[in-house]
Amino acid sequence: MDNAISPLQRRQARLAHWLVLPATILMLLIYIVPISLVLLASFTDYTLVSDYYEFIGFDNYTRMFGDEVVGNSLKNTVFYAALFLPGAFIISLILAITIQEQKQFRSILEVLYFLPVTSTLAAMTLVWGALMDSSQGVINNMIEIFGFAGINWFGSEDVVLYSLAIISLWSVIGFNMVLFLAGLTSIPQSLYEAASMDGADHPLDKFFKITWPMLGPTAMFVAVTSSITAFKLFDTVAILTQGGPDRASEVFLYLTFLEGFEYFNMGYSAALSLVFLGIIFLFALAQALLTDKNVHY
């Protein structure tokens, strides 16, 4: 059997390499080179207010373990994620199942729920800030109409993370709902008919025996992407609270921004960025591995 490569195959291989080259260069410029530079900066005491810097090894990383501010920001991030993730998953799934069963106005409902995804988050954050204003906000005015005291949405240490979670849920639920709808649409109706013939007539029986197992790949994707979104909280904090009150909403990514562009400690900020990237990667990987065991493909 002749295993020699023909001239045509060699030309095709060269062409394939040339076609892949632009994407490879773009990946290097956008991802690999910046991450490498951040890694190098994390081992220095580089600041934005001085041209002189020294190599300090792992000092920036060891500093984190004794930094109470870093611990506080990590605690706030985890607490916010614990508020955000169940709602982003469960509410989206319930909406998708409800809309899937609608015979009329289904397309209109899909568009309405998806509209927040198409909105600019920064602009809509300002709108939410006005709606949740403690003194003149529409939401507090409606609460007071029913005889309850208004809520200090962004000025209370006990409430501020809940407020940010509400805004984030509003912006992401429509996207997750569309993903679940795509998964529901791909489930063959014959499975439901077979389940009915076997006596599984109750909606809960159909959900746990057919819908949920068949939604496994979609559910895993939604869980991982929602987790990454939760840890990437920045916009609403920067616009509405700036980490306040008393650092109650200072999440990890916002602290990284402060260290780099407010306090000018770029070396320390670079180290925080890499630790943040590692936390997201490990969390998403663990979640994917644990979820994948129960997924039916």
Image (cartoon, helix red, strand yellow):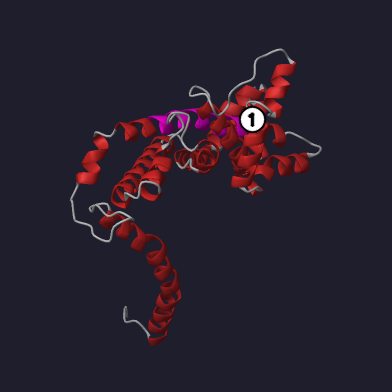
Q: Split into 4 quadrants, where in the image is the N terminus?
A: bottom left
* Label 1 sits on residue: 132
Check the image and name the residue furthest to the right.
Answer: 104
Instruction: Return the x and y of residue 73 as percentages of the image width and height.
Output: 38, 34
Choose between 83 and 106: the one closer to the eye: 83
Q: Is residue 184 visible?
A: no
- Which corner quadrant of the image does residue 202 belong to? top right
Q: Is residue 217 magenta?
A: no
Relative to 110, residue 213 above or below:
above
Label count reads: 1
Q: Residue at x 65, y 47 (%)?
A: 119
- Which corner quadrant of the image does residue 209 belong to? top right
Instruction: Return the x and y of residue 3 as percentages of the image width and height.
Output: 31, 78
Instruction: Return the x and y of residue 168 as percentages of the image width and height.
Output: 57, 37
Q: Residue at x 73, y 41 (%)?
A: 112
Q: Residue at x 39, y 41 (%)?
A: 255
Helix, strand or loop: magenta stretch = helix
**Helix, strand or loop at mark 1:** loop
For this view, does 94 lie left or right of residue 109?
left
Check the image and name the residue furthest to the bottom.
Answer: 7
- Which corner quadrant of the image does residue 115 belong to? top right
Instruction: Return the x and y of residue 254 as percentages of the image width and height.
Output: 43, 41
Q: Residue at x 75, y 17 (%)?
A: 145
Range shown magenta:
75-92
Q: Is residue 85 magenta?
A: yes
Amino acid type, callout 1:
Met
Q: Is residue 101 visible?
A: yes
Relative to 36, residue 174 above or below:
above
Mark 1 crowd level (few <14, some 14–19, many ≥20, 10 Å Cα): many
